[in-house]
Each structure stands twice: as C-alpha cells, then as structure tokens.
Image (cartoon, rainbow, N blue to C red):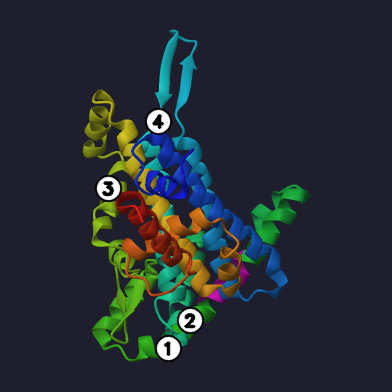
Amino acid sequence: MENKFEQYLRLSQPKNYRDSLEAYQMVLDSGLYISQAVHKSLPKKDRDEFINDALILFQMTMAKGIAVLNIAKPINYYNSLGDMTLPDFVDPMAISALIRPQYEAFTNFNNIFNSTENEDARQFLYDVWVIAGLKERRRFYVEPSDEELEKMPATRRKTALERKEKAQNELKIIESLSEKVRKSSFYVDLDDKKRKNMDDNLKRRVFQFALSNGKMVKKSWLEMFLNTGASEVFKPMYSLMSTTNHPSNVSVFQYAQMFDKYENIQSAQTLLKMSEKIMCFFIADYCRYIPKAKEEYQNLPEMNKVIIETANKYMRDFDFKLSDTLDKFSEEIELFMRDKFHGD
C-alpha cells in the first residue's frame, strides 16, 4: 500500500492517464465542496452584486470541470451502422473547448476582485464588465411592435411584454452605469485620444481592462492571465486553445495527426493538467476574496490541500497563504527521505 508521499508524487507528476484523472477529480471535488459550502452560508438575499457574481463565476468554472472530467474519460463507442467500434475514445479538442471558458472566468475573476485593493478600480472594472454583458444580450433581443403584440395569443403576449420590460430595465442600467463610468477618474483623466479609444472599446462590448500604473489599460486575455502571477510556461496555452476551438486549417491537420499517431491521450493528459492548474489557482483566488471560502478550505483532506498549494507555490507568483499544510508536508517529506536513504 502506498504511503502519502508516494501518493503525492504519483498525483503531482502523473505518469499515466488514470492518475491524471484521479488528480483532476481531487481538485475538482475540492472546488465543488467549497462552492457549495459558501453558497449555503451566504443566501442570495444577503449578497451584494459583487459577492453574488464572484460566487457564480467560481461555480461556473467548477461546473465546467465536471464536464471536462466526463469528456476526458475514455469511452468505448459502438456504431451499429457498419459495425464500427471506437475503443477508449477521447477527443482532446472537445476538452479544450471547455477549458477556455475556465481560463477566461478565472482571469476575469482575478482581474476584477483580486488584482487591486483600489475599490474605485474594482468598481470600474466591474461596471464595464456588466455593461459589456448587458449590451451583448441586447444583440439577441428584437422588440416587438404594438401591432405584433396585438396579434399574439395571450400567453405569448404576456411573455413578450415581460421580456420587453426586462430589456427596458436593462437599458436603463446600461445608461446609468455608462454615465457612472464616464464620471470615473479612470475615464475623466484620459486625454482625448485615449478617451475615444475607451469609448470605442465600450461600444464594442470590450471589458478586458486592467489597472496599470494608475491607468486603465486594455489587455489581451493572455496578458490578463499572466497578470494573475501564472508562470510563463502557460504562455502558449490561450493560442493553443484558440487554434483548436476554431475550424482553421491548422486545427484540421493537427486533429488528423493526433489520431494517426495515437497522441490523443497524451494531448488530453496535457489539457487536463492545464485545467487542473486553473482550478487550483481559482480556488486560491476565491479563498482570498471570500473569507468563508478560506474557512471551508481548511476542512479539505490533507492531500487535496497539498496538491492545490503546490500549484500555487510553484506555478505562479502568489503571496496569499491558504494554510500551513504544504509547509508541514514538505518537512515530513524531508524527514521521510532522510530516514529512507540515510537510516537515522
């Protein structure tokens, strides 16, 4: 039977796909446990808009992890038409499509809630994010005319009127928040050219701004991700996901080569580790912003905490201490190795 140090080495540096799945589920279960506990302790009626959206962003990302885990598990697919069998089938590109939203959700959470202690900056970043989201939703709404409403059956008309009222209320929110943004020092202090650029970005529903030297600067997703303290080893990650998530010629021949060379499992294993690290980072950020989350984190099994804290210590520049678990575990490993190889 393996001891906990052997378990740690097996899960932190998995040499086979089964161990990768086990490590992934360990981190996923930790995030889901914390999410559920925080939601129970903070009823929706007691949350302000910041806390509510922070909770939902985290919950969404962990939920994507459930889907990743299930898609990543090999399946034996049988097609009775032609008697075709696909043994142990795994599609890495399907996994990649789910990891990109995790990447962006974590990055956005960190940028709004944890990247600065400046409350005005947090409010600005939050407001432009809300404006962009509401504007995006309005693109899919076509307001019915009075004549069209008149011709609708009663039930459908009722629903249409409710949607119309909701759309009008959201428009008022957009206008109110836009006015608030234009009065912010982060907007007012811009020169004319930069103010116009800001207006153009807001019109195009762009919300990826970050505070840099006291100014709001438009950033790419990659720049924002690296701002979380993530290691440079993650630098190619976003481009990789973008390439595989779109039907570019590159994605087509990569897909063909991957299965021709039986590299799909290896690719899936790499993507699982990416997603696992994102969840580890997000758990740490969530605990930093939500005190109750850090409190619940302490209830996790030792190995879960060691895996999460290892990722945050060695794969990013992160100055928030989740617990003393990793420090104590490292001391135990040192004593264990000393005893194993040097006797007493």
Residue 190 appears in the rendering: yes
Q: Earlier in the sequence, mark 2 or mark 3?
A: 2
Q: Residues within 10 Å of mark 1 (few under 14, many from 20)?
A: some
Q: Which residue is mark 4?
A: 90
Which residue is more in the foreground, 232 or 3?
3
Label 1 with label 3: CB-CB less than 8 Å = no
Disc 3 versus disc 4: nearer the observer: 4
Q: Residues within 10 Å of mark 3 (few under 14, many from 20)?
A: few
Label 1 secondary element: loop
Part of the protein shown in magenta: 167-174
Q: How many angstroms separate mark 4 from mark 1 (CA)? A: 49 Å
Label 4 secondary element: loop
Q: Residues within 10 Å of mark 2 (few under 14, many from 20)?
A: some
Q: Is residue 65 above or below residue 146?
A: above
Q: Earlier in the sequence, mark 4 or mark 1?
A: 4
Disc 1 versus disc 2: nearer the observer: 2
Is residue 23 covered in magenta? no
Q: Which residue is mark 1?
A: 184
Identified at 31% across, 47% down, the residue is: 241
Q: How many angstroms separate mark 2 from mark 3 (CA)? A: 32 Å
Q: Earlier in the sequence, mark 1 or mark 2?
A: 2
